[in-house]
Image (cartoon, rainbow, N blue to C red):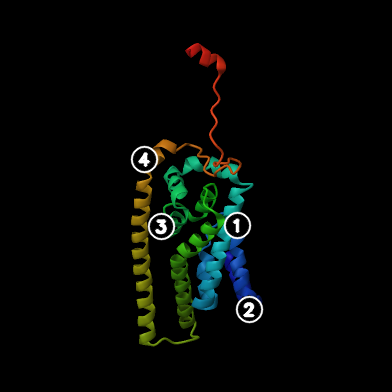
Amino acid sequence: ILKDFLLWVEQDLGPWGPLVLAIAYIPLTILAVPASVLTLGGGYLFGLPVGFVADSIGATVGAGAAFLLGRTIGRSFVVSKLKDYPKFSSVAIAIQKSGFKIVLLLRLVPLLPFNMLNYLLSITPVPIGEYMLASWIGMMPITLALVYIGTTLKDLSDVTHGWSEFSTTRWVLIVLGLVVSVVLMFCVTKVAKSALDKALAENEDLDVILASPQLPIVADTSVNLNQPLIIKIDPSEENHEQ
């Protein structure tokens, strides 16, 4: 289905192709369908600059749509899935302390499945603005790598079909680009994982105290923390003590 969709985008949509490609991320992300084919397709069809912009915006908007769905009508479903992801309890506690940083690191490190992470984060107190910005920045490296691979596949396809020829220099640049992409992804992931482990470890003690099988993570906005704490004393118990 995705292959037919990409062919339709390439052959029939013209300049509207990148926009439609970006919009296609919304239903795929909501339905938790891996969108890597779309990301590769963006590079294959539109090249590095246009394909990267379309894929980056599309992935971010799709993640935001799933987040809003999980924060509203899908909240009970997401809470019911918490038991399947025991690692997330410590993540949820850490997000209360530094939401933007944790979301950014989670996007760089594949600690949890990408599509389910959108829903799990929706029941944390992280604001939608911070979530979107951190997700957009955090997904850039993997998006750029996949788009570059897509452009390379297009170049190789052109060669195998006899539509273009590559010089030795061009082959060296392609191989070098792929190697650099893999090395950068490895380095970024390693650094992000170290930072994420450190952030989660700082909240380990608090996690033991507050963790719950069904953590009610989203704060109740009806509670006014500025109101004074009132303690009622039962007169009968006071007389008894006297």
Sooner in the amino-acid sequence: mark 1 or mark 4: 1
Measuring 53% from the left and 72% from the top, which residue is drawn there? 53
Viewport quadrant of the N terminus:
bottom right
Q: Position of residue 128 (x, y in %)?
A: 56, 56
Image location (x, y in percent) of residue 149: 44, 72
Residue type (three-letter) at the residue carrying disc 1 = Ala
As rendered, which of 167 and 242 lies closer to the eye? 242
- Determine if residue 44 is in view: yes
Q: Is residue 60 above or below residue 97?
A: below
Which numbered tag is attached to residue 109? Answer: 3
Q: Residue furthest right?
A: 12
Query: In the image, residue 222 lies at what x, y percent?
Result: 61, 41
Q: Three-letter amino acid code at disc 4?
A: Asp
Distance between the alpha carbons at the discs numbered 1 and 4: 33 Å
Q: Which residue is mark 1?
A: 65
Of tags 4 and 2, the one toward the viewer is 4
Label 2 Cα crowd, 10 Å radius (few <14 / some 14-19 / many 20+): few
Label 4 and label 2: CA atoms lie apart by 54 Å
Q: Earlier in the sequence, mark 3 or mark 2?
A: 2
* Label annotation for residue 239: none
- Looking at the rendered structure, the kind of residue marked 3 is Val
The residue indicated by pointer 4 is 205
Mark 2: secondary structure: helix
- Distance between the alpha carbons at the discs numbered 1 and 3: 21 Å
User: Can you identify the residue that label 2 sits on?
Assistant: 15
Q: Are marks 1 and 3 in contact (CB under 8 Å)?
A: no
Alpha carbon of mark 3 to alpha carbon of mark 4: how far?
23 Å
- For image coordinates 46% across by 82% down, the residue present is 159
| Mark in front: 1 vs 2 | 1
The label nearer to you, 3 versus 2, is 3
Q: Residues within 10 Å of mark 1 (few under 14, many from 20)?
A: some
